[in-house]
Image (cartoon, grey):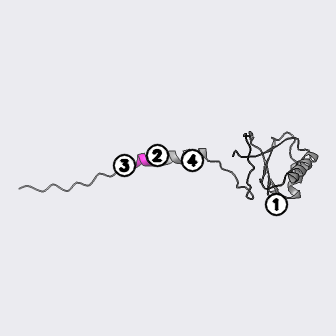
Amino acid sequence: MRFAQPPRRPRAENIVPMINVVFLLLIFFLMTARIGPPDPFEVVLPSTEREAPSEAGKTLYVSADEALYYDGKTGDEALEALAARDPEAPTLLIKADAGLEATVMAALLRELAARGIKEATLLTVLP
């Protein structure tokens, strides 16, 4: 008398390599992403022929309608916070909208100089 062989269960797929790949991709994207707070308002940067080096520092945002934002403060409070910043702090980065008039930017730079800001870098983009 022959007994029938019991049916074999299909072998389970090994998903460990897939989990390893997913974690490697996650680590890659976390390491290459720039994680930071979003800009307080939309700023279209002016274009330039050469790229200026940007240092890691606090940024002054200036919109096309002359609104100021610096370190969580707006308007005159932003200018007061700039005046109170450490003189040894890195160069101030200015992210001004391309639609901002040059005369307004010049007046802002004079105001910053009067408040003790010796160096500032205007952020631009390549065309």
Whether the magenta-drawn stretch holds residue 16 is answered as yes
Q: Which labelled disc corresponds to residue 14?
A: 3
Magenta highlight range: 15-21
Q: Which of marks 2 and 4 is nearer the N terminus?
A: 2
Label 3: element kind: loop
Label 4: element kind: helix
Relative to 61, does residue 53 appear above or below in the rendering? Answer: above
Q: Which residue is drawn at 71% across and 46% down?
A: 125
Q: Which numbered mark, 2 or 1, is in the foreground of this view?
A: 1
Residue in the foreground of this view, choosing between 57 and 7: 57
Q: Residue at x 53, y 48 (%)?
A: 26
Amino acid type, callout 2: Val
Q: In which quarter of the image is the N terminus?
A: bottom left
Q: Which residue is drawn at 83% across and 41% down?
A: 89
Q: Spatial distance from mark 2 to mark 1, Cα to Cα? A: 48 Å
**Residue corresponding to mark 1:** 65
Q: Residues within 10 Å of mark 4 (few under 14, many from 20)?
A: few
**Residue corresponding to mark 4:** 29
Relative to 46, does residue 42 appear above or below in the rendering? Answer: below
Amino acid type, callout 1: Asp
Amino acid type, callout 4: Phe
Amino acid type, callout 3: Asn
**Residue corresponding to mark 2:** 21
Q: Spatial distance from mark 4 to mark 1, Cα to Cα? A: 36 Å
Residue 13 percent across, percent down from the top left = 34, 51
Q: Earlier in the sequence, mark 1 or mark 3?
A: 3
Residue 82 percent across, percent down from the top left = 86, 49
Q: Spatial distance from mark 4 to mark 3, Cα to Cα? A: 25 Å
Q: Earlier in the sequence, mark 2 or mark 3?
A: 3
